Structure formats: structure tokens, C-alpha cells
């Protein structure tokens, strides 16, 4: 290593001061070390940036090429929910009397379901302090 102040040659690597001009060499060693670390970081950042760019280009090109490929379209799409019309489909609206019949039928089905579930549920009571209390429903003498 050379002295950066007086250019004295062949200084020892662990020398703290220059033997000719008595300059402190520690600060110069720290500058060199910091410079080396900064160069390493730049190399790492460059490599990561290149990797990110290649990855982004790969994803973008995969998306573009995937968009061009067309999947086979079924001739008659499966109807997932018969109550909801599909796009472009126009279904007849039931008359008021038909709607009333449909709703009454649905009410009867729900009442039957409610009755079957009634024996399986717990009774929930609210205490005076607002706390809920669940109590198993007792079977009546009629059910025995």
C-alpha cells in the first residue's frame, strides 16, 4: 500500500501511521473498505434487478401468449343456478297468481323443515343481566 498523502511506497498493511509524513492511515483504510462494500452491494442489486426484469418479462409474455390461445367453448353451457337467468337469456315472468302459488309452496316446505328442526334445537333464554342461557328443550309427554 502507498501513503495517499506523500506517496511513500511499500507501507506495511497494518501500519497506523506513515513513517515519512506521520499521516493517520486508518481513515484511508476505512474509505477503501467502504468502497469495496458499496461495489459488492451494487453487484447484488444489479443481479436482483436483472432477475426481476427477466421474471416480469416472462410473466408478461406468458400472459400475452395465454390470452391468444382459445379454450374450447361448450356448445350448451351448464346452468349452475336455474333461478338466475344467464347472460342474454330472457325468461318469462310468472303472473301474480302463479307467483302466489310458488311462494305458498315454498312457505309450506319451509314450515315442514322448521318443524323437523324444532325438536333438535335448544331454547335460548335471556337473563336479567342480558346474558344468554341455552337450555335443552325437554320432550313433551305427547312426544313420548
Image (tube, helix red, strand yellow):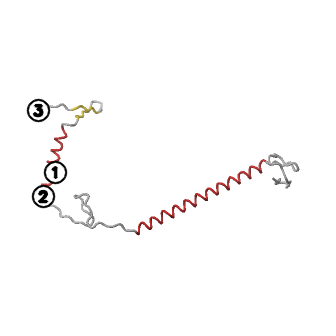
Between label 1 and label 3, give the one nearer the viewer: 3
Kindly check if marks 3 and 2 are in contact, taking CB atoms under 8 A apart as contact: no
Quarter of the view holding residue 74: bottom left
Q: Which quadrant of the structure image shows residue 97? A: bottom left
**Left or right position of 24 against 142:** right
The residue drawn where x is 14% and y is 61% is 95
Is residue 104 shown left or right of residue 69? left
Q: Residues within 10 Å of mark 1 (few under 14, many from 20)?
A: few
Q: Position of residue 9 (x, y in %)?
A: 85, 54
Q: Which residue is mark 2?
A: 98
Q: Secondary structure at mark 3?
A: loop
The label nearer to you, 3 versus 2, is 3
Residue highlighted by disc 1:
106
Does dot 2 land on a helix, a strand or a loop?
Answer: helix
Q: What's the CA distance linking mark 1 and mark 3?
A: 28 Å
Marks 1 and 3, the one that precedes in the sequence: 1
Cα distance, mark 2 to mark 1? Answer: 12 Å
The quarter of the picture where residue 91 lies is bottom left
Tag 1, which secondary structure? helix
Quickly name the residue at label 3: 142
Foreground residue among 9 and 108: 9
Counting from the top left corner in percent of width and height, residue 72 is at 33, 67
Which of the two discs, 2 and 1, labels the residue nearer the N terminus? Answer: 2
Residue at the front extreme, as displayed: 72
How far across and down, in percent of the image, does residue 122 sit? 23, 35
Q: Outermost residue toward the bottom?
A: 68
Gap between marks 3 and 2 measured at Cα: 38 Å
Query: N-terminal of the two: label 3 or label 2?
Result: 2
| Location of residue 3 in the rendering, given as x and y in whole percent from the top left corner | 83, 53
Neighbour class for label 3 at 10 Å: few (<14), some, many (≥20)? few
Amino acid at each position: 500500500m502507498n501513503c495517499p498523502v506523500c506517496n511513500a511506497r511499500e507501507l506495511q498493511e497494518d501500519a497506523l501511521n506513515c513513517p515519512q509524513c506521520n499521516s493517520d492511515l486508518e481513515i484511508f483504510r476505512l474509505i477503501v473498505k467502504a468502497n469495496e462494500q458499496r461495489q459488492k452491494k451494487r453487484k447484488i442489486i444489479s443481479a436482483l434487478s436483472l432477475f426481476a426484469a427477466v421474471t416480469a418479462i416472462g410473466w408478461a409474455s406468458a400472459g400475452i401468449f395465454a390470452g391468444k390461445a382459445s379454450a374450447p367453448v361448450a356448445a350448451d353451457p351448464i346452468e349452475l343456478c336455474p333461478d338466475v337467468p344467464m347472460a342474454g337469456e330472457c325468461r318469462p315472468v310468472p303472473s301474480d297468481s302463479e307467483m302466489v302459488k310458488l311462494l305458498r309452496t315454498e312457505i309450506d316446505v319451509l314450515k315442514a323443515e322448521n318443524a323437523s328442526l324444532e325438536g333438535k334445537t335448544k331454547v335460548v333464554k335471556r337473563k336479567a343481566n342480558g346474558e344468554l342461557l341455552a337450555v335443552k328443550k325437554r320432550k313433551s309427554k305427547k312426544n313420548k
